[in-house]
Image: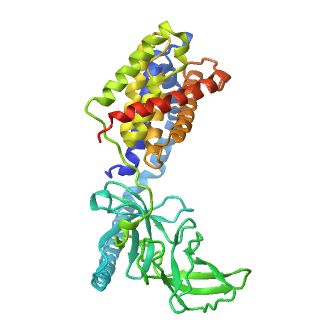
Amino acid sequence: MAGIPSRHKSVVLLAGVILLQVVLLAVQIKRDSQGRLLRVWTVGAVSPFERAGARGIGNIRGTWSRYFALQNTSRENEQLKQENDSLKLRLNQLQSKAAEADRLAALLNFRQSQRDVPMLAARVIGTSADSASQTVYLDRGERDGIRRNMGVITPDGVVGKIIESYRDTSQVLLLTDKDSGVGAMLAESRIQSPVGGTGEPLLAMKYIPTDDAVNVGEHVVTSGMDRIFPRDLPVGTVTEIKTGRPFQQVRVRPAATRECTGGGGGGKTMMNDAFDLRLTETHIEVHKFRTGAIVAATILALMVQAFVPVYFQKFAVLDLPLLVTIYFGLSRRNPSTGLLLGMVIGLLQDSLSGPTVPLGLYGIAKTIVGYLASSIGARLDTEHPAARFAVTVFFFVLHQGAITLTRRLLLAEPEAWFTMRMGIAAGVNAAVAVFLFMLLDRLRKS
């Protein structure tokens, strides 16, 4: 049985944690004469299958007598078909191994001709399920030193670049994708112009002035100006030219086709690491904290949230456990850790909120916030006070929306989606978060 890809594990964990808390809520809630909500759900889910089973039992018996009884008479024919299919499969396997040997020989020759460029061999193991996205997955990841914006090439030419790197796999955005591109130039005239994908088999060479001469059949190579690929790697060949103002419309056939990148099944690519030290993307640091800092901050926030509003009622507008969840989610930048921390903080807040709040109400909301905060923190720099203010407003509204949805669907309690008090509370919590996050920054390891 295939394991769950590492990039999806946090999503599966999120769904599982929320489902467990929904079941926990259902066990606690009772719907008048219908009994506990969990029983209502169970009976409602099982009843249609029972009715369908009772209605279809007669049809199944008839099908058995009319169809499956004929199986004995066709057994010999079935065995012959199986033998034939087995021979076909064996032939395909032998042809695939022969093709793979040819690819490996080409890769070896290519690697020897590019000794000055550090490379790492990788195998294409999958493609995107979205037909609008031109991406493939490789069997190399962070453990092999793969990082975002590394170039990916084959002996035929440029393939694309790394857009996501996971523990054991990485995702490549192919050059043919409409969001992809590479710094390029014409091999003969050395006219430079970026080449981008169109979502179709042909590429588009942009910004070639009308007065510049371009010939069909002219080769296009990398210019090195994008600081990802070295100069003079094959990009493609000019196949179509249309006049325009102020730029010509130049179409380029990629040098590395879909078959070369493994689209036809399990090819190998070469990953170029020559310019990774000069990439210009922002490095987002994963912060580490002093021993016990997260536990201490969580306990302190829960205690203050539980006891201070008893003496100062206006303090109840703050949700310190939520702010702690947001901060550590943004700082740790691990979706699995973020959702688990949010679940623990939310369930503890539920247990301290009295009998009117069932276990799981805050747990579900803070699980979602913890997961999304960690996911956003891994992609965006949220260290600036203005960014922290905006992010906190967003997560506060999301948190209250999740609570409202839970109350309306599971508790059958009428509750407004948005009120003026919620808007004011979002602003107050965001303002407090800016200063609170500065204090929590002191808990980080230097």
Residue 398 coordinates in the image, percent (x, y): 56, 32
Residue drawn at x 34%, y 70% is 273
Write down the quadrant of residue 412 in the picture: top right
Front in this rendered view, residue 261 or 365? 365
Residue drawn at x 30%, y 61% is 145
Residue drawn at x 50%, y 71% is 175
Residue 18 in sight in this render: no
Front in this rendered view, residue 148 or 4? 148
Residue drawn at x 54%, y 29% is 431
Residue 215 in sight in this render: yes
From the viewer's perspective, is residue 2 above or below residue 369?
Answer: below
Front in this rendered view, residue 388 or 113? 388
Residue 317 coordinates in the image, percent (x, y): 55, 19
From the viewer's perspective, is residue 245 above or below residue 127?
Answer: below
Lateral position of residue 124 relative to residue 419, left or right: left
Lateral position of residue 202 relative to residue 233, left or right: right
Q: Residue furthest right?
A: 245
Residue 215 coordinates in the image, percent (x, y): 60, 92
Write down the quadrant of residue 269 in the picture: bottom left
